[in-house]
Amino acid sequence: MQTNLKPLGYQFDWIDVYDPTEEELLLLAKNYQLPEAAVRDCLQSEHLPKYETFENYHFIIVRFYDQKCTAESDSIQKLTRKVALFYNDNFILTIHRSRFELLDKVAHKYGNNINMIHPFNLVCKIVKNTFESFEKPLDGIDETISNFESKIFLKKRTPDLLKNLYLLKRQIHVFKRLNYVSKMVVENMHGSYRKNSFYEDMRDYYLRMEVFTEQLHEDVQSLLHLYLSISSQKTNEVMRILTVFSAFFLPLTFVVGVYGMNFEHMPELHQKWGYAGVLIFMLLITVLIFQWFKRKQWL
């Protein structure tokens, strides 16, 4: 589906193409003299952000957060969708497969805006809005990390906590990787249009999101290490208790085993004080072990 957005009041042509077929894209390439290789990139749903400059056009691919993705999504293809932009001084062409509500928002918000006299200004707004689409999921991850952190410190049992932490780690890794690749787009866009307020606004927002994503990545890594450390500490505590019990019962079991053999020439078996003597001896062993543990501060 192809829409001409110039009636909204823009001083340049803006063609928005939604869910095109391969034949439609090749026809666009022919009509607007677009590089066919770049147009074919628009068909690849898994394509990462990129920036290229041709003789008549600048070409950008950026990705935005997919609001319909599932909670278990943990890859760039599952978490995000892409939008491709061709632009020059008089023209913008946007191509995307899935519905991009933020694009409609930008189109209606800046129509008849006298500041949008150049396509590059609008491209900066579109790219900034793709970055803004990650703000809500990143805030959600930040809140989830805080909740998990409190549960870990308060020692509340949470089912599948390790699995959820790993999923968060995967999602943050995807966002961090996407930020790294998008940095090339942001830096290269600056080459042709210097001292542009729309570009500086987009760049500042990108830098804030990059810092925020890096912070979340470090937080989830630290939380994962903390969880594993606490789990290891709990295991060590259980092993310590079991070791204490074993230390008490091992010598007692040895004494009982010796006198449980019932050989004929064991004199204690025929003494009146034999049973009481062995019990007193076992009690003495228990007291000595207890005192030794107390002196070592193991109890």
Image (tube, rainbow, N blue to C red):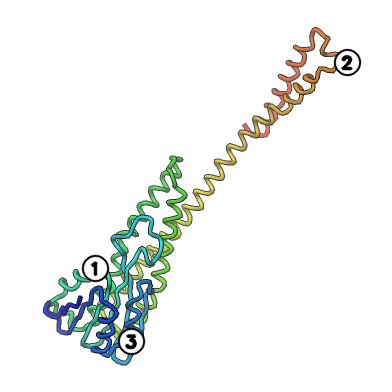
Outermost residue toward the front in this view: 23
Q: CA distance from mark 1 to mark 3?
A: 24 Å
Task: Count how many numbered circles sit on residues in the image.
Answer: 3
Q: Which mark is residue 99?
A: 1
Mark 2 or 1, nearer chain start:
1
Circle 3: is it few (<14), some (14-19), or many (20+) Cα within 10 Å?
some
Res 28 → quadrant: bottom left
Amino acid type indicated by mark 1: Arg
In which quadrant will I find the N terminus?
A: bottom left
User: x, y percentage for residue 197?
Assistant: 25, 78
Q: CA distance from mark 2 to mark 3?
A: 102 Å
**Above or below: residue 84 compared with residue 153:** below
In which quadrant will I find the C terminus?
A: top right
User: x, y percentage for residue 297?
Assistant: 64, 34
Q: In the drawing, does residue 276 fall left or right of residue 265?
A: left
Amino acid type indicated by mark 3: Glu
Q: Which residue occupies 27% across, 82% down?
A: 23
User: x, y percentage for residue 38?
Assistant: 34, 83
Res 113 → quadrant: bottom left
Q: CA distance from mark 2 to mark 1?
A: 94 Å
Q: Are marks 1 and 3 in contact (CB under 8 Å)?
A: no
Q: Which mark is residue 265?
A: 2
Mark 2 or 3, nearer chain start:
3
- Residue under numbered circle 3: 36
Amino acid type indicated by mark 2: His
